[in-house]
């Protein structure tokens, strides 16, 4: 939900740029290295993933007015999954990057996950 899978990189106001996760060893922890982001983001990892032959179902969802643009990225990821013929659901609901949006989506996300675990809904 509200996936931080930005291509080519997160917007300036995204928390994905903070905390040093994508800073590398030579940058201060508050910096962001786009090359590290891109090397770890799904487009770079898709060839290796596809080679495994594993099918990974995805529930992809966002508010349709998310200020971080996750709704645009969600659509892009869904389209990629469809092209790879992987099971996926895309849900765009009214709202932004808020708890209210996620609260609305949780039941559907859990129902989707349970369909692929063998556990009855």
Image (cartoon, rainbow, N blue to C red):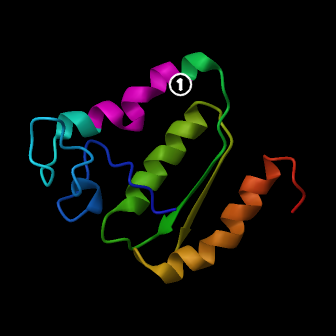
For residue 60, what is the image quadrant? bottom right
101, above or below 36, in the image? below
Total numbered circles: 1
Residue under pointer 1: 49
User: In the rendered view, does 26 fall on the left or right side of 82?
Assistant: left
Locate residue 95, reporting x and y percent. Answer: 45, 79
**Frontmost residue, 88 versus 44:** 44
Locate residue 38, reporting x and y percent. Answer: 28, 35
Q: Residue furthest bottom?
A: 100
Residues in magenta? Answer: 38-49
For residue 8, what is the image quadrant? top left
User: In the rendered view, does 23 fall on the left or right side of 44?
Assistant: left
User: In the rendered view, does 97 fall on the left or right side of 115?
Assistant: left
74, above or below 38, in the image? below
Locate residue 117, reporting x and y percent. Answer: 80, 47
Q: Residue furthest right?
A: 120
Locate residue 79, reporting x and y percent. Answer: 52, 43
Examine the residues drawn in magenta and state their main secondary structure: helix
63, above or below 56, in the image? below
The residue shown at (39%, 57%) is 72
On-image quarter of the C terminus: bottom right
Q: Say if the magenta span includes residue 45.
A: yes
- Is any part of residue 32 visible from this angle? yes
The residue shown at (72%, 54%) is 113
Neighbour tally class for label 1: few under 14, some 14-19, many 20 plus, Cα within 10 Å: few
């Amino acid at each position: 939900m509200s996936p931080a899978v930005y291509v080519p990189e997160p917007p300036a106001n995204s928390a994905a740029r903070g905390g040093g996760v994508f800073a590398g060893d030579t940058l201060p922890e508050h910096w962001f290295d786009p090359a590290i982001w891109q090397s770890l983001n799904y487009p770079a990892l898709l060839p290796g993933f596809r080679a495994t032959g594993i099918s990974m179902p995805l529930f992809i969802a966002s508010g349709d007015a998310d200020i971080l643009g996750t709704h645009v990225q969600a659509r892009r990821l869904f389209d990629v999954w469809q092209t790879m013929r992987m099971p996926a659901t895309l849900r765009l609901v009214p709202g932004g990057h808020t708890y209210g949006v996620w609260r609305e989506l949780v039941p559907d996300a859990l129902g989707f996950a349970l369909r692929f675990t063998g556990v009855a809904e």
